[in-house]
Image (spheres, rainbow, N blue to C red):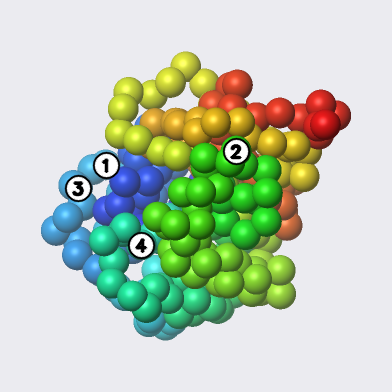
């Protein structure tokens, strides 16, 4: 596959680039600063901004999929509206380019996914990351009418660490709850994203990426 990665210099995106290349895919990193991306075989780096629909459509042309790992840092100044401003432009560019698959990286705790979280996790979602998560929630409402073959991925807490032996990928509507504060290495969610982008059966679905024990199925719900 030929995969375009947005947010390729970030924590998740940089790992997605590495994972995509390691699996033998052709990867395009669309970034503001090409110098921040290490040149590698199989990787094409394209300079551009997230508000330039024409430039993105050109970068997306001929690709099989786009993975958007765009995110806002905790230190970002308010108002936080990055996703609301940019996601409609990104999806329009993907439509212009005829992209077959679009995978958006969100977060567990965004929108109604928070109802499946533990008390401690909900407290964090309502305080520390509240503005960031609200921006994501509002932006994601546009995806069902985008005309794209989309999937929204909600990973649990992430950290920089050696890859764990495995991660769990589940449809959100089959998850009753996510106990505690499960945490995965960035490498694991990157691997899951590359697998998800190749699974066209996940079109129009929201999925959870968590640890092996970091979820409870619906049939066990109280």
Which one is in front in this view, the residue at disc 2 or the one at disc 3? 2
Residue 67, image x, y percentages: 49, 55
Which one is in front in this view, the residue at disc 3 or the one at disc 1? 3
Task: Say which residue label 1 marks.
Answer: 41
Q: Which element carries disc 4, helix, strand or loop?
A: loop
Which one is in front in this view, the residue at disc 4 or the one at disc 1? 4
Residue furthest to the right in view is: 219
Mark-to-mark CA distance, 2 and 3: 42 Å
Contact flag, marks 3 and 4 (Cβ < 8 Å)? no
Q: Earlier in the sequence, mark 3 or mark 4?
A: 3
Task: Say which residue label 2 marks.
Answer: 118
Mark-to-mark CA distance, 4 and 1: 29 Å
Up the image or down, 184 lies above or below 57; here it is above
Task: Say which residue label 3 marks.
Answer: 39
Q: Which element carries disc 3, helix, strand or loop?
A: loop
Q: Quadrant of residue 53?
A: bottom left
Up the image or down, 220 lies above or below 120; here it is above
Task: Say which residue label 4 marks.
Answer: 72
Q: Give the residue drawn at x 52%, y 42%.
A: 121
Q: Earlier in the sequence, mark 2 or mark 3?
A: 3
Q: Give the residue drawn at x 30%, y 52%.
A: 10
Residue 63 visible at all: no
Which one is in front in this view, the residue at disc 2 or the one at disc 4? 2
């Amino acid at each position: 596959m030929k995969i375009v990665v947005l947010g390729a210099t970030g924590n998740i995106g940089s790992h997605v680039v590495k994972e995509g290349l390691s699996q033998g895919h052709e990867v395009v990193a669309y970034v503001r600063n090409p110098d921040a991306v290490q040149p590698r075989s199989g990787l094409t780096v394209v300079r551009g901004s997230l508000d330039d629909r024409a430039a993105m459509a050109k970068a997306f042309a001929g690709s099989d999929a786009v993975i958007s790992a765009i995110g806002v840092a905790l230190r970002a100044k308010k108002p936080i509206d990055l996703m609301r401003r940019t996601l409609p432009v990104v999806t329009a560019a993907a439509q212009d380019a005829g992209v077959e698959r679009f995978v958006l990286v969100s977060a567990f705790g965004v929108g109604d996914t928070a109802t499946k979280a533990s008390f401690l996790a909900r407290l964090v979602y309502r305080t520390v990351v509240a503005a960031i998560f609200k921006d994501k929630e509002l932006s994601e409402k546009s995806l069902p009418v985008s005309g794209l073959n989309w999937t929204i991925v909600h990973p649990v807490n992430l950290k920089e660490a050696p890859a764990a032996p495995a991660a769990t990928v589940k449809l959100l509507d089959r998850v009753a709850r996510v106990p505690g504060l499960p945490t995965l290495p960035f490498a694991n969610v990157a691997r899951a994203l590359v697998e998800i982008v190749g699974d066209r059966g996940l079109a129009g679905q929201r999925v959870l990426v968590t640890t092996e024990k970091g979820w409870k199925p619906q049939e066990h719900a109280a």
